[in-house]
Amino acid sequence: MAENISPFSKSITELTKNKLSVIGLIIILVVSLLCVLAPFICSNDPTQIFPWIGAQSPGFQSPPCLSENVFRVGQAPETSKKILSYKTLIYTVKRSVSEQLRIVVRRGKIHRLTSLTGAKNFVEFNLNKEFEEAWELTKSDELGRLLPKAKLKVNEPVPEGLMEPDQRVMIVQLVKKIDNEIIQFEFDQELLKGIQRNGREIDQVTLKGENIVSISDGKNELKTRFLLGTDELGRDLFSRILYGGRISLLIGIVATVVSLLIGVCYGAISGYVGGKVDRIMMNVIDILYAIPFMFLVIILLVLFGRNIVILFIALGAVQWLTMARIVRGQIYSLKAKEFIDAARVCGASSQRIIFYHLIPNALGPIIVYATLTVPVVILEESFLAFIGLSVQYNGQNLDSWGSLVQQGMLSLGTGGERYWLLIGPSIVMALTLFGLNCLGDGLRDSFDPKTKTHA
């Protein structure tokens, strides 16, 4: 006796024979799993900024610390959580002394050179000769740009590139590095037990991340690895890609579900009722097809804000038209089948026939089109992010793959020296779209035998 196999099981068996579809499914599962498990996989916070690190190439390593690390005896330290499991840590810290120089310019020539630290005037001063670095000090007393090496002399023209043409006064922060110092910390169950600075006991110390040279446990040096490098603010690119994937995949899936809800209901009602109602409903779709929907989405985002819910609704509303036509065609052919006549004879209502008999039997094409809709939505969201309309939540931009690609383009550099900022998110997004399209094509071939080609 021949074994009865359902059409759905047969379609799944056909799908597993399609190598490209299986590869696409594996890619989607791997990428989705990595994105979902990002908090457990990523050792670095994607929002953590390390400005002193800047853009570093893949594989870069640095000591695990924050911009400002506070240590107080008897309290848990305010620093990277990666160090809390150690009992003893030894920090090597850069020490520096600084001096401020005031430069006054008149008629394009240096009028006065004054040391604000020692209240002393100079006839000439050579930047970066005695001091290793010279920085422009901003009005908010923060370090601005690193100044070029230059020799300053009273009554001489201002060296090229030192000051703006209309600038008359500049305060320069001169920094001189001296010998490193050693600070040892003792911990007891994550609480700080003691601090020794160059062999002397102290109660508290605050260390800037930019001054920490190395951290060790007495045997091995502790380092944080940035697998795919960092961006211009020192943020971990690998973590940003995985967290960005959560945003892109969420938008793709939710917007597709929105388009399914609208398109399936609209198409099912149109196909089942038929006649004049069907013609009117299809004419409405034809009219809507003529509207440039991407511009409509942009207008909605501009008017109502770049809220993630608005983006879900806007992108979902763009995609439902084709879904409605596909469902309408399936329902139109299914409603003439014998099992629908049997349902009517049994007294089933139109609502029950549509949602319990017709739509479940049209699930094959619906699943296929839904799979192919997800990559389309991801691409549309990426385009919006690329033109500066990235999605926001509580006023903060959410970095999806599209916004990461846009930031990578802007940070690439004149010679493409920061290539990893563009290549990383681009490859991950391209692989995901490739996987989704391969799976969608395989599902189409499996659920619709008429699309297969025979030798």
Image: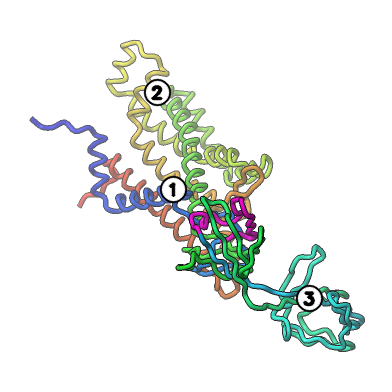
Q: Nearer the viewer, mark 3 or mark 1?
A: 3
Q: CA distance from mark 2 to mark 3?
A: 78 Å
Q: Nearer the viewer, residue 284 or 238?
A: 238
Q: Secondary structure at mark 3?
A: strand
Give the amino acid at mark 3: Glu
Give the amino acid at mark 1: Leu
**Residue 6: percent from the left, percent from the top?**
22, 32
**Residue 280: percent from the left, percent from the top?**
51, 28
Q: Residue at x 41, y 31 (%)?
A: 328
Q: Earlier in the sequence, mark 1 or mark 2?
A: 1
**Residue 366: percent from the left, percent from the top?**
38, 36
Q: Which residues are magenta?
A: 65-87
Numbered circle sitting on residue 355: 2
The answer, for residue 227, to whether it is visible in the render is yes
Q: Are marks 3 and 1 in contact (CB under 8 Å)?
A: no
Magenta stretch holds residue 82: yes
Give the amino acid at mark 2: Phe
Q: CA distance from mark 3 to mark 1?
A: 49 Å
- Which secondary structure is most common in the magenta stretch? loop
The answer, for residue 386, to whether it is visible in the render is no
Q: Nearer the viewer, mark 1 or mark 2?
A: 1
Q: Which residue is mark 1?
A: 37
Q: Nearer the viewer, residue 81 or 184?
A: 184
From the viewer's perspective, tell me whether residue 36 is left or right of residue 177. Answer: left
Q: Quadrant of the N terminus?
A: top left
Q: Is residue 99 above or below residue 435?
A: below
Q: Secondary structure at mark 2?
A: helix
Q: Secondary structure at mark 1?
A: loop
Q: Which residue is mark 3?
A: 99
Magenta stretch holds residue 286: no
